Image (tube, rainbow, N blue to C red):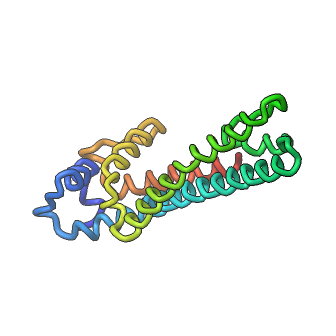
Amino acid sequence: MNLSDITVGQFRKYLQTGDTQGLSGWEDLFLMFIDKSGIGQTQEYELMMAIHNLNVRMVSVNAFIDLQKEWFLNFEEAFEPAFKDLAKFGIKITYDPAEPRKFIQRLELIESSEKRNVAEIDSLTKELQDLRSKGVKNSGKFVDLLLRLIVTLNKEGYRIEKDVTDMEEFALMIKQHNEAMNLLRERK
C-alpha cells in the first residue's frame, strides 16, 4: 500500500482509533507521510528553538540581575543603561533613588518569577526526547496537529477533502506550505 491509496479521512481514523486491521504496513505508511511532509523535522525544530529561546532568556535575565546586584553593592544605585536589555523580554524595571530597597525587591521578584522557565525547559526537553525516541505519532499531539494542518491549509487555499484527498497529496501540500512559510520568514 502507498500513501496515494489512503485518504486523509482514513488516515485520521487510523490515528484516532488505533485500529489498523485490514491495513497492511501502517507503520511504513505513517513513516512515509512523516518523511514526505517534513512534519517530523518541523516539530523537532520548533521544540529546539523554544528550548534555545528560553535558555537565552534565562541566561540574559540572570546576567542582568547579577550585574544590577553587584553594581548596587558597589555604587548604591542601579545601572540604568542596562534596563533596555530586559525590555526585549517584556520585563519592565524602574529605579527610584528615594526608594532603593524597592529596586532590590523588584530584582528578587523577577528572579523568582523567571524560575518557571526551568520547568518549561524541562517539559520541552522531555517532549523533544519523547519525539525523538517514540516518533512523532506517539508524541500525543499528532491528531491535533493533523487537524490544525487541514484547517490551515484550507484557509491558505489548498483544497483538502477528507474522503477524496490522498495522503501523498496532503503530505506534499504540507511540505510546500512549510517551504513557502520558511521563505517568508527568511525575507523578513
Instruction: Give how far across and how far down residue 67 sits, in percent.
Output: 78, 53
| Left or right: 140, with 187 as reference point | left
Viewer-closest of 8 and 44: 44
Q: Residue furthest left?
A: 22
Picture quarter containing residue 104?
top right
- The residue at 27%/44% (across/down) is 162
Asked if 35 appears above or below 114 in the picture, the reply is: below
Where does residue 171 sit, x and y in percent of width and height? 39, 56
Q: Position of residue 1 (x, y in %)?
A: 23, 67
- In the image, residue 105 above or below residue 37: above
Query: What residue appears at the point 30 percent right and 53 percent down from the top-left corner?
Result: 166
Give the left or right position of residue 8, taking residue 68 as reference: left
Q: Quadrant of residue 137?
A: bottom left
- The image position of residue 160, as x and y in percent, is 35, 43
Q: Quadrant of the rendered structure where residue 88 is? A: top right
- Which residue is located at x 74 percent, y 54 percent? 66
> Nearest the camera: 85 or 151?
85
